[in-house]
């Protein structure tokens, strides 16, 4: 199914997008996989290749008598230089993540088994609500998605889901449970997203395909969206294969923008964007399948 991710701006766009349907299961409490990632901010060899994942339970902390302290965990990149989505970063950090029966991981429903299927979530409109993870979580009770590039101290609320957005190496991925809040009062994770290894002048760039499953049919168009920081120039660097993927070349708007892409042949295409600044050049890729 094709669905433009900009339709999810606000609530739904922040609910971790991923392709495919998955069986929703209940993970046990404290389900962090100890063989993946490690506690704390990424350090050492991982400081500029990994990403720090923060899970802030907010109003779920202590709900129903279940304590839920904030999790800060490094998500190393096993293949530094390759792109990872926000969902992949969660999994590489060892965080248990579950989606909905309708969308699979297209919408993140539980992190570390919270909210569980048995706990009561006191929504304003439904004080006895329990999250079954059958459909899209309600606007009154959902996991909001945030990010930061590591060079500052503030979070940015993501206008794209966690599959449609590639993480920034050295940066932070944040998840915060929002209960009875609005788009303007959703709480950011209560951890300062600063990585001492990231230079304040280093450029960052991220590229996304604006479709729920990053698949379209031949003859359809989609949109590529990019954002950058500390860049003096942003360029549509390459598309692979070089033919059939549509026009992707030349200078792009800085610090960000969108461009429509109309592929001319079936296949899987990888688009690369380049950002250059005083701290060097960085790249980001996004993949689209044309059926």
Image: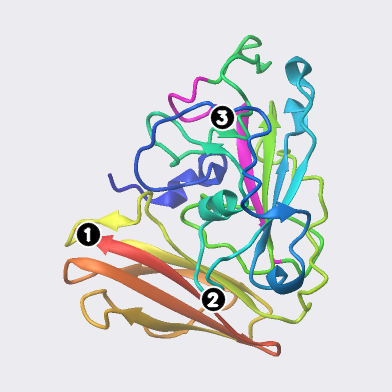
- Dot 1 falls on a residue whose secondary structure is loop
Q: Position of residue 56 (x, y in %)?
A: 74, 40
- Of label 2 and label 3, which has the lower sequence position? 3
217 displayed left or right of 32: left
The circle drawn on residue 220 is 1
Image side of residue 251 versus residue 261, left or right: right
Quarter of the N terminus within the rendering: top left
Return the mark for residue 81: 2
Nearer mark to the viewer, of 2 and 1:
2
Residue drawn at (70%, 41%) of the image: 184
Callout 2 environment at 10 Å: few (<14), some (14 to 19), or many (20+)? Answer: few
Would residue 135 be counted in the magenta stretch? yes
Q: Which residues are magenta?
A: 132-149
Front disc: 1 or 3 = 3
Location of residue 86 in the rendering, given as x and y in whole percent from the top left corner: 55, 54
Check disc 2 and report its element: helix, strand or loop.
Answer: loop
Q: Which quarter of the figure is the C terminus placed in?
A: bottom left
Alpha carbon separation for disc pair 2 and 1:
31 Å
Q: Residues within 10 Å of mark 1 (few under 14, many from 20)?
A: few
């Amino acid at each position: 199914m094709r669905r433009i991710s900009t339709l999810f701006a606000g609530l739904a766009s922040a609910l971790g997008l991923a392709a495919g349907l998955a069986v929703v299961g209940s993970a046990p409490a404290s389900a962090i996989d100890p063989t993946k990632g490690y506690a704390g901010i990424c350090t050492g060899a991982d400081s500029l290749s990994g990403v720090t994942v923060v899970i802030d339970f907010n109003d779920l902390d202590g709900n129903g008598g279940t304590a839920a302290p904030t999790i800060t965990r490094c998500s190393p990149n096993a293949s530094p230089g390759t792109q990872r989505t926000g969902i992949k970063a969660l999994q590489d950090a060892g965080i248990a993540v579950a989606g909905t029966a309708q969308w699979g991981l297209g919408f993140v429903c539980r992190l570390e088994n919270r909210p569980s299927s048995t706990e009561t979530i006191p929504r304003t409109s439904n004080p006895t609500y329990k999250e079954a993870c059958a459909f899209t979580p309600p606007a009154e009770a959902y996991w909001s998605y945030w990010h930061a590039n590591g060079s500052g101290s503030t979070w940015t609320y993501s206008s794209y889901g966690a599959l449609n957005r590639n993480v920034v190496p050295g940066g932070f991925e944040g998840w915060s449970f929002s209960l009875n809040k609005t788009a303007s009062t959703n709480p950011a994770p209560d951890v300062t997203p600063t990585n001492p290894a990231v230079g304040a002048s280093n450029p960052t760039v991220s590229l996304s395909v604006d479709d729920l499953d990053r698949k379209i049919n031949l003859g359809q168009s989609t949109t590529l969206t990019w954002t950058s920081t500390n860049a003096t120039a942003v360029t549509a660097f390459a598309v692979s294969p070089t033919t059939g993927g549509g026009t992707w070349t030349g200078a792009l708007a800085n610090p960000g923008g969108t461009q429509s892409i109309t592929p001319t042949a079936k296949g899987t295409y990888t688009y690369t964007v380049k950002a250059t600044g005083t701290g060097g050049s960085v790249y980001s890729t996004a993949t689209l399948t044309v059926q």
